[in-house]
Image (tube, grey):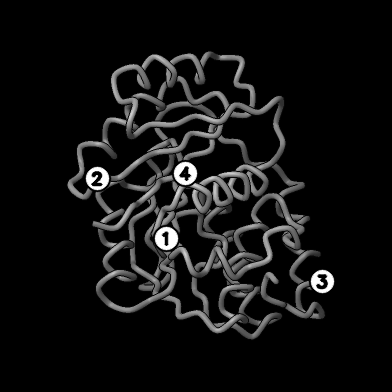
């Protein structure tokens, strides 16, 4: 059986941490979870440590000091996953905006259908977003239109944070060269994988806005993505050596 790791970055997710962990572990397929917590003052890491006593072989935690950025959290997790021999590595939010039940669909798109990485796409078949303000839907949707236009890649949901990467993709991308930290990180990783010749599958999912906890979104994240995409257009993407 393939070794599968779900990476979940957290910051003040005490309302969701245990629920999302148990929901993933309720799935068939033997998923493991790596929580990367950026110094949550609400006790998220402590709650995870308590669960680790119950699930020591499947649940892992990396604690970092302060909010260091979503992108750096995932890059830390990717490197940890490679060091520990995982075959497929997933990105997923802690707040149930990504349905754990869709993890097997992302996995199947790679393991069964031949993709090298798969994206849980909000925009592959129209717009599949629930309980988001219309302004945020439009901003997110047209961000992907902007990426397709500037970078010339056919990705309908380039900012999606629900992704499955095969080991060979993460081994090939030069993660030390990834520059963006927020939404831009999601764009840069997908663009790098496509430019390096890997096959993408977009799996339609329904994205549901969080019910508990608070969003970590900020205007600076969008600004980084806007200017970062222009920089990507003129950058040569090279594999890790």
Task: Give the mark, 2 or 4, whose residue is nearer the N terminus.
Answer: 4
- Label 3 crowd bin: few (<14), some (14–19), many (20+), radius 10 Å: few
Which dot, 1 or 3, sits closer to the camera? Answer: 1
Which residue occupies 41% across, 68% down? 118
Residue 231 has which mark? 3
Instruction: Say whether residue 39 is left or right of residue 5.
Output: right
Q: Is residue 1 above or below residue 44?
A: below
Which residue occupies 76% across, 73% down? 232
Q: Residue 109 at x, y = what percent? A: 31, 70
Q: Quadrant of the C terminus?
A: bottom right
Distance Cα–Cα, label 4 vs label 3: 27 Å
Residue 30 has which mark? 2
Distance Cα–Cα, label 2 vs label 1: 15 Å
Label 2: element kind: loop
Q: Which residue is mark 1?
A: 164
Which residue occupies 35% across, 51% down? 4
Residue 7 has which mark? 4
Q: Are marks 1 and 4 in contact (CB under 8 Å)?
A: no
- Label 1 crowd bin: few (<14), some (14–19), many (20+), radius 10 Å: many
């Amino acid at each position: 059986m393939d070794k599968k790791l779900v990476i979940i970055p957290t910051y003040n997710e005490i309302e969701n941490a245990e629920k999302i962990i148990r929901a993933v572990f309720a799935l068939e397929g033997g998923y493991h979870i790596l929580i990367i917590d950026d110094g949550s003052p609400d006790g998220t890491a402590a709650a995870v440590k308590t669960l680790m006593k119950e699930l020591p072989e499947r649940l892992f935690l990396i604690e970092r000091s302060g909010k260091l950025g979503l992108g750096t959290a995932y890059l830390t997790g990717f490197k940890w996953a490679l060091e520990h021999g995982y075959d497929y590595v997933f990105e997923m939010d802690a707040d149930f905006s990504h349905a754990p039940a869709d993890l097997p669909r992302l996995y199947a798109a790679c393991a069964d259908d031949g993709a090298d990485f798969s994206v849980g796409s909000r925009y592959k078949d129209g717009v599949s977003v629930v309980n988001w303000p219309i302004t945020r839907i439009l901003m997110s949707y047209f961000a992907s239109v902007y990426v397709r236009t500037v970078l010339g890649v056919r990705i309908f949901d380039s900012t999606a944070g629900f992704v499955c990467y095969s080991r060979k993709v993460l081994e090939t991308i030069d993660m030390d060269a990834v520059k963006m930290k927020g939404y831009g990180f999601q764009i840069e990783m997908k663009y790098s994988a496509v430019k390096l010749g890997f096959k993408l599958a977009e799996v339609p999912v329904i994205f549901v806005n969080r019910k508990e906890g608070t969003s970590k979104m900020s205007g600076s994240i969008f600004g980084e993505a806007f200017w970062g995409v222009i920089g990507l257009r003129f950058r040569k993407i090279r594999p890790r050596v």
